Amino acid sequence: MNNEERTTQMSEEERSSEERRLENDEPGRPIWITILAVAGILAVIFALGISVFQLATRGSDRVSEITAGLGGLFQRSERIVLRVDKSTVNSEDEVTIFLEHRNKDRGENGIYTVQIDCEEEVTARLNDTLVACNEEIELGKETPESFTVTLQAESERYTDIPVIVRYVGGDEVVETDTLLTVVNTDIASTPTKDEDANEDSDEKTVTDAEDSEKITTPQYITVKRYGGRYSDPNGIADLRVSITNTGIIRNGDFRERDEVSENERAALSFTVSNAGTKETGTWYFSALLPTGETYYFKSDTQQNLLPGDRIEYILAFDDIEGRGDTKLYVYADPVNSLAELSEINNIGEAVFDIR
């Protein structure tokens, strides 16, 4: 081998050796970065060692305290949920209230109680047993699936009565309530002629047996009944129409009647309530009246109803016509401008027996 070949061979060996060295050293990373990374890992390990030593020296109480704190952070809250088969009932009707105790501590041994928040003129029964207003009644230690309440209200047509359920277990008390609206059908729902009246601006000409040309206007009067509760911004409103009575207007007063003569001023008593969980905002109602020529009546803008609020109406009109049973229809929010739980209960139907 001559000198030139030996020189070339040495150069190739040197290059191979240099490439292996660079691969092992991960080219492009300065050595000081590696040193800092190792130092950081050692510092973290040292800090963890100090923390463990401090916990060990403080004893098991400190560990229990930390564990309890974390448990409380992630534990779901304990609560009682009530559901009713109907929230508005006639006086003396039975209501079934269903109870669910969520996230209850299984090892806990407490007592369930019920309290009916009412006044002296209300008669209350719990599971068919007569109880006093505001008396706290024990339901027992086992979680009841349901219980029944029967209420009789005497002084008002509408009475809102909270039913309160409590669970007392040790030092903890879990409490919730539901609101029942009791309707005394023996008390007239009609406002008097002295209360505010609203008249529709459209006039119509009618004819009856006594007066061949009389200009009249369908007219309604209202009474707002406040039972309103909190409006859930994430909830949904639900207008509900309930027909109360048919009748006539005589001497400015509403008189309940099933039979109506063609020459009488017919009238209808009905209620619109908000059975939803969110306020309604403004709205209006309409009515299809059974007059000589079918008449479409549209009300003024009606006021906002909170959940549980209701308005009682008396709608009066002339020129009722027909033979036998004649129907009148009332529509709350007829163009469906409100988002509601149900549109089916926005319509009420009344039947007049025309003589």
Image: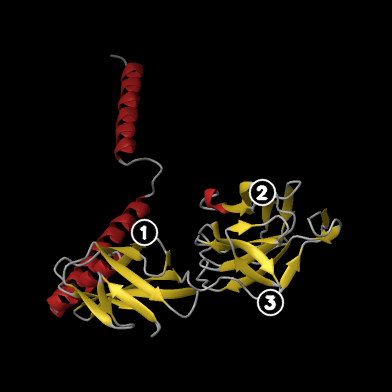
Residue 153 x/y as whole percent: 42, 76
Q: Indicate which label's residue lies in the foreground, 1 or 3.
A: 3
Picture quadrant of residue 188: bottom right
Disc 3 target residue? 195
Dot 2: what SS? loop
Residue 329 sits above or below residue 154 on the image: above
The three-letter code of the residue at mark 2 reads: Val
Dot 1: what SS? loop
Query: Residue at the location (53% across, 52% down)?
Result: 345
Residue 132 seen from this side: yes
Query: Residue at the location (55% across, 68% down)?
Result: 309
What crowding class fits label 2: few (fewer than 14 Cα within 10 Å), some (14-19), or many (20 or more)? few
> First in sequence: mark 3 or mark 2?
3
Dot 3: what SS? loop
Query: Residue at the location (40% across, 61% down)?
Result: 86
What crowding class fits label 3: few (fewer than 14 Cα within 10 Å), some (14-19), or many (20 or more)? few
Cα–Cα span, label 1 and label 3: 35 Å
Using residue 199 as the reference point, say whether residue 311 is left or right of it. Answer: left
